[in-house]
Amino acid sequence: MAAIGVHFGYTCACVAIFKDGRADVVANDAGDRVTPVVVAFRDTEQIVGIAAKQGRIRNAANTVVKVKQILGRSFDDPEAQAHKADSKCPVVNKGDKPMYEIDVGEATKFVSPEEVAKLVFHKMKETAQSALGSDVSDAVITVPFEFGEMQKNALRLAAEDAGFNVLRLIHEPSAALLAYGIGQDSPTGKSHVMVYKLGGTSLTVTVMEVNSGLYRVLATHTDHSTGGESFTRTLAQYLAAEFKKTFKQDVTGNPRAMMKLMNSADVAKHTLSTLGSSNCFVDSLYDGMDFECNVSRARFELLCSSLFNKSILPIKTLLEQVGLSTSDINKVVLCGGSARIPKLQQMIRDIFPDVELLNSIPTDEVIPVGAAIEAGILVGRDTSSLDEDSITVDCCAKDILVKEADEFGADVYTVVFPSGTPLPARRQHTLQGPGSLSSICLELYQSNGQNCTPQEKVADIVLGNLEPKDDPWDIVTVVTMKRDGSLHVTCTEQESGRSEAVTIAVAS
Amino acid sequence: MLKEALEGQVTVVCNVIAASVQFQVEPVGRWFEAFLKRRDRNVSASFQELEEEEELEEESEDEELQLEEYPMLKTLDPKDWKNQDHYAVLGLAHLRYKATQRQIKAAHKAMVLKHHPDKRKAAGEQIVEGDNDYFTCITKAIEILSDPVKRRAYDSIDPTFDNTVPTKSEGKENFFDVFVPVFERNSRWTSKKHVPKLGSMDSTFEEVDSFYSFWYNFDSWREFSYLDEEEKEKAECRDERRWIEKQNRASRAQRKKEEMNRIRTLVDTAYSCDPRIRKFKEDEKARKESEKKAKAEAKRKEQVEREKARQAEVEAVRQAKEKEEEEAKQAAQQAKKEKEVQKKAIKKERQKLRTSCKNWNYFSDNEADSVKMMEEVEKLCDRLELMSLQSLNEVLLCDSREEAMAAVEKQIQEVNTQLQQERDAELAARQAARGAEQGGGGGGAGSGNKGWNEDELQLLIKAVNLFPAGTSARWEVIANYMNLHSTSGIKRNAKDVINKAKNLQKLDPQQKDEINKKAFEKYKREHVAVPATADNAAPSERFDTSGTDISSAAWTTEEQKLLEQALKTFPVSTPERWEKIAATVPGRSKKDCMKRYKELVEMVKAKKAAQEQVTTAKSKK
């Protein structure tokens, strides 16, 4: 029962396999665990991955990068236009579909983005199958949350053309949650998780609600202008300035030299995530002159400080949008290659001082691992009944609270049945009452929307005629909400077995 | 810490719970899958415990399982295991195929506890050694019933199953009583879940339809491997095994086919007997009938209307025609009347003329003159119109004899000239007709006679040479050219010209010679005339002029070429152009050249004009 999870990003693709109950990322034939989504076209062959990325210096016009940006879009789409403006490989309009114009020797060939994606998927499949040693093709593929139906279909088709049996397309933030196995671990069954993804070219922050193991996206924010590439560019600009300082030569106008500098800056950036300083060395950068420069982590952080601030900014706006405070977030999941940067992790930790920061899995592998886990689940189930990619479920609309008194006698409200719980559901709590009382009252309220302020009382449950004792009363309260929305509450006093039950009808 | 209940507070529900809302969830994770599974299975509560409880209940039922002792058990022959009832052996005869695996297991356990040879030995019973003991039957029964495949094979041929299919006559009388149990019985073979019920008389069309489509596409798991004659395991070698397998497969297929036929017959019978189907059919028929009727009605109405419209139209046409005819008739009558009136008037006038002439005694004294005059007057009467007759009569009535005579004579003269003219015209027409006849039939000489004189022949030859074959609309151009240049004034068209030219080509050499000679004569005549005039005018210049004449006529092609070349090399703007041109053409003076040039220009102009005329005429057409 093996299965594959694929993350197809803007800059990098990564594949993980689920085997023997665990999911792990597999390295490609070059030994890298992530493969750049760069496809180079030569006269007779297509090269995918790091070789294409290195060869881009010489073959920029026939090398396709960031194909995901244009995948499944019409030519007039602003994203497609932005891609066209950005791409070194010419993009032409063919029947409202964007096509890459590839120069193969004497003739020009038109290649659709779907075909490019197919080549990448094919590479991922080869990687996965060489690791598995068998021709498993069942796969789960991740898509960004903002992907539309057209783009999803294009991605699915490309994957199927490459030979994958696409079990399901799942959203990237959900995959990140799956990778850490976030589920029913909070006492009420409800928690909030923030997924912070800083990829190669995009920044996505998503707030999710996890309830009874079901994930729900509350809000999401995507910024396509911030990403690992902006850090690299900043560093490359700095290197160019250094070069100018040393050799009195301006290389910023030379695209090939800049591309070399970018590659070098990329390596340096990666090194700086683990080491305190990095040495950049470019042979024959300009006019036969070699370039060497040492960059410290502090220097890098200084250079990119404004970018870091920009990367952190969406967290606050998003929290305001959903009406949560930083303390309402139970977990933060980091994913995307650039989330590795120590400074960035430090800044996020500063925002959420007492929240668990999940970064134990390498950040660029979180999403494929989650996809592989999902693939494993899907392969293991007996029926395949789900056709749509997301479904709606009936959920409890409001928090159900019980009124208690704290040690000073003030009223506090405890959530016994949180809002957003998929129905039907049952929650069991053991409430305690002072042993000196002969009768105990549970007052049930329902909340007013998000915050737990009680709005209206729905029921009183009274357990009377108790014999006072020294130990506190343990009252097991079972709260059940049925499929139709009606609430059933049973309270049982453990020692005497006295019980009291009410059924609260649902508003029509 | 919970609070204390207030005095008099009781358990009470004081409000309703807000209605549930729908949220979109991410389709990931094992909890999601579990949720889906629960939802699809439609379990009323989401709790694992509830299901477990149910299972527990089932188990407790098992414990209460009633086993029916099989009275024949002890007499069974293990060798004949194939024909024994395995359910009965295990004491499950009342449950049969409905028995769960757990029940079978429990029954077997109970049976073993009771019938195991060791137990019986302990109880002091006599035991048959080896496989011949009836306990082997129990072992065989559990062997078959515990294996799902074998059990299915055995269930398929369950001896208690009633394979009968009710006949049509049975089904017709009380359909539901007969068929409901039959379908219920047979539905146990289905491999699909949710068998539609036969329903009742009130079932909707959809229900009945789904019922029959289910049964017509019945997917049965019933198979007949249990009835295999040979056992594969008994075979000694592979070939034998294969042969057995083949045999078995054939017989199984045969049985399966029979089974399918049985089901088919059952469904067919039910379908044909089903009163609901009949009802639906009748309804449908009635509906179609009514539709058809409505359609026919509509069609008929339409036809009637169309017929009406057509008749109205015909009527209108007829009326219009009648009216027209009437008008025409009236007009004709009117005309006739008028004509008669006129006739009468003319008659009267003529009479008047005659009498007045008579009165004047025909303006003559002697007999002969008067007779002649009478003739003339008669002629006048015949020829003159009403108006002129009237005016003549007026003149005759009022004036003197001389004046009257003059008037009459003038009239007579006029009439006579008119008559003469008419006669001439007739003659000319007759002559022309004759000429045309000759021209059409006669060919060469005939048409040649039709006014082709020597000049014209010359002109034609010249024109033909001027416009060689290949000129666009050549013959029209030639005809035009001739019309422009001929002196005879006869208009020729292209056809005439073609005919003539062809004739000329066909002419025998003698005639050609003749024409040439004539041409020469003409030439001589002309050229004799010219020197004569020149002679008269300026004798000193005679040689010169004749010289020019000769030389102008005798421009050789070589000289012509040289001239043309010179004209080209010295454009108009060249000073002293003609001197230079003359210098290039040896033996020609400046004057010669200029003259020749003028000639050429005229020739070209004429050619162009002729061509243009034709093209304009054509475009006008």
Image (cartoon, rainbow, N blue to C red):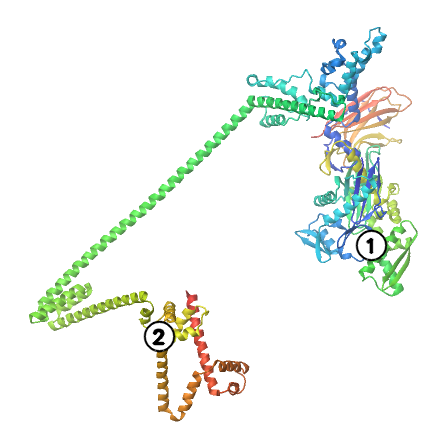
Residue A238 figure quarter: bottom right
Gap between marks 2 and 1, in whole Å?
103 Å
Residue B433 figure quarter: bottom left
Quarter of the rendering occupied by the C terminus of chain A: top right
Whether marks 2 and 1 lie on the same chain: no
Secondary structure type for disc 2? helix
Viewer-proximal residue, B210 or B83? Answer: B83
| Chain letter for the residue marked with disc 1 in the picture | A
Which residue position is annotated with label 1? A54
From the top left corner, tell me how far across and down residue A4 is, in percent.
79, 40
Viewer-proximal residue, A506 or B363? Answer: B363
Viewer-proximal residue, B62 or B171? Answer: B171
Q: Amino acid at mark 2?
A: Gln
Q: Which mark is residue B510?
A: 2
B277 left or right, relative to A155: left
- The answer to whether residue A453 of the structure is visible from this angle is no
- The answer to whether residue A340 of the structure is visible from this angle is yes
Decide: is A387 above or below B358: above
Residue B316 figure quarter: top left
Quarter of the rendering occupied by the N terminus of chain A: top right
From the top left corner, tell me how far across and down residue B288 is, in percent.
50, 30
Please identify the residue farthest to the right as the structure is shown.
Answer: A276
Decide: is B60 above or below B474: above
Between label 2 and label 1, give the one nearer the viewer.
2
From the top left corner, tell me how far across and down residue B303 is, in percent.
41, 38
Image point (81%, 15%), residue name: B109
* Label 2, residues with CA under 10 Å away: few <14, some 14-19, many ≥20: few
